[in-house]
Image (cartoon, coloured by chain):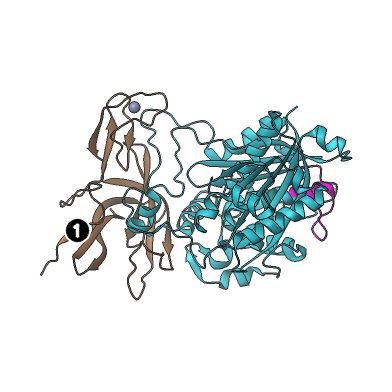
Amino acid sequence: MSATKIPAVEGWFTLDDEPRLIGSRCATCGTYFFPKELSFCRNPSCDGTELTETPLSRTGKVWSYTVNHYAPPPPYVAADPFVPFGVAAVELSEERMMILGQTTGHVAVGDDVELIVDTLYTDDKGEHVVWKWARA
Amino acid sequence: MSDVAILGAGMHPWGKWGRNFVEYGVHAAREALHDAGVHWNDVQFVAGGETVRNGYPGYVAGSTFAQAMGWNGARLASCYAACASGAAAIDAARARILAGLCDVALVVGADTTPKGFLAPSGGERQMDPDWLRFRLLGATNPTYFGLYARRRMALHGSTEADFAAVKVKNAKHGLNNPNARYRKEVSIEDVLKSPMVADPLRLLQICTTSDGGAALVLTSMEYARKNGAKDPVKVTAVSTVTPRFPKTVVDLPDFATDSAAAVAPPELGFRDSIATAAYEEAGIGPEDLDLAEVYDLSTAIELDWYENIGLCKEGEAEKLLHDGDTTIGGKIPVNPSGGLACFGEAVPAQAIAQVCELSWQLRGTATGRQVDGARVGLTINQGLFGHGSSVICVR
Ligand SMILES: [Zn+2]
């Protein structure tokens, strides 16, 4: 039995076997954005307004990580009993930016990681999923 | 001339009192006015640091305090810049005085805080990054502090015990501070035995949230002289700079940094640039400081600040700490007040409290924690959403 997978946020990531975060890129200067920015470029020296959705790199390197040992307050939906979970900041070399995500399994600074889509929480509507980083 | 005088400083002790924030603010304001020898009716401008956890009166803090003191016709500002709100209020008051629009300004910040983690506003807020970081990542404020601490360990070989030594120092500093909430010595073992919160940071390495209030009476130099203050403490720089694009370190409440694909990162990171702007405005450098009050949201962040404000080179903060340089009696005492480690954070009051401490230290009246012969001090802090906050005071 497989429950419905519901993205915890609309339009931030794909749900296929090799999931990707969906960012955007300025056609004028080439700057990437995540979460995607579609109206105006935020490079202060660029007046670009043509920004298009673009999938971001699936892999990166861990800049740093932490493990939350206490349940965060709402709107986080914490498991009961609470299970500690990791959060990592991951550098994408092509986009030259860092993106946060929860982790599955242990990661360390400098590790190569890849993007996966995994359970954030489950309720009677189904399985709410989010992007996470996992050791490649 | 870009100096303004600090004629008075006052605080309501930090704690978990559970009373209305207005009470703490008015208490601190009255203390500051009394300290300055200035009557409330002579205050021409009130700048309030806003609190976002106390409903409408918190959003219009300047007006709330003015009404509670008794309407006197003063003009108002209410400033919100997250942890930097107090500096934003000081900045507004100072600018008004330097513009010649008023001679006497009162700056007040106070907060009543709930228990536990600071949480975002309620409701379904799919367009609010602060709401989304809790929802999608479970990223609390300590989560970000944990990321910085782990990074510091990976880069410089720092250990949990290094971080714990910051807490031990600050706990000792705050022992005799009547406004501090925690006045108890702490050992390295105490810190390392406390529960893990956001790896590698434990409970005693992360600041709590507190109730409290702080206030300053700022005046023009001319007003200060006319009122007999021959050698007042002066505010000589207020740095409220924002980051420069692309910002390449992830800050609360961001999901990601800016991309540096098209534009190279600026030479100075954001935190470095906050201090640099303050030094430039004051015309001094880190070697001129006698003390600093830095925002120790976590023990590890205090070490980062040593480097950001130029007390030592990158990676050398642990040595500075262990050599005793940042302890009272050392070369450059940091957080002689006890810092957030002894206070806990009362958001809109905290940056003002940092400046209260500088003014007492520079006057030589910081009983039980006095830095000998202090003449120049700096505060530094960074608010969520890109708010720099650094104040330099001299006497
Ligand atoms: Zn652009």
Whether residue A26 sits left or right of residue B247 in the image: it is left
Q: Which residues are magenta?
A: B358-376
Magenta highlight on residue B75:
no
Q: Is any part of residue B313 visible from this angle?
A: no
Q: Residue at x 81, y 42 (%)?
A: B375
Which residue is tagged 1? A6
Taking A99 as reference, is B172 above or below it?
A: below
**Does residue A1 sit above or below B280 in this rendering?**
below
Image spot of residue B333 (x, y percent): 74, 51
Give the residue displayed 57% in from the left and 57% down from the top: B298
- Relative image position of residue B107 (x, y in whole percent): 67, 46
As rendered, which of B385 and B150 lies closer to the eye? B385
Q: What kind of secondary structure does the magenta stretch mostly adopt?
A: loop
**Figure check: A39 above or below A115:** above
Residue found farthest to the left:
A1
Q: Position of residue A136 (x, y in %)?
A: 28, 53
List x then y, in percent, for residue B283.
72, 30
Q: Where B235 sits versus B181, above or below? A: above
Q: Quadrant of residue B239?
A: top right
Q: Amino acid at mark 1?
A: Ile
Identified at 66% across, 60% down, the residue is B24
Q: From the rendered image, report the letter of the chain displayed in brown.
A: A
Report the chain shown in cyan.
B
Question: Tag 1: Cα neighbours inside 10 Å, few (<14), some, or many (≥20)?
Answer: some
Queried whether the magenta region covers residue B364, the answer comes back as: yes
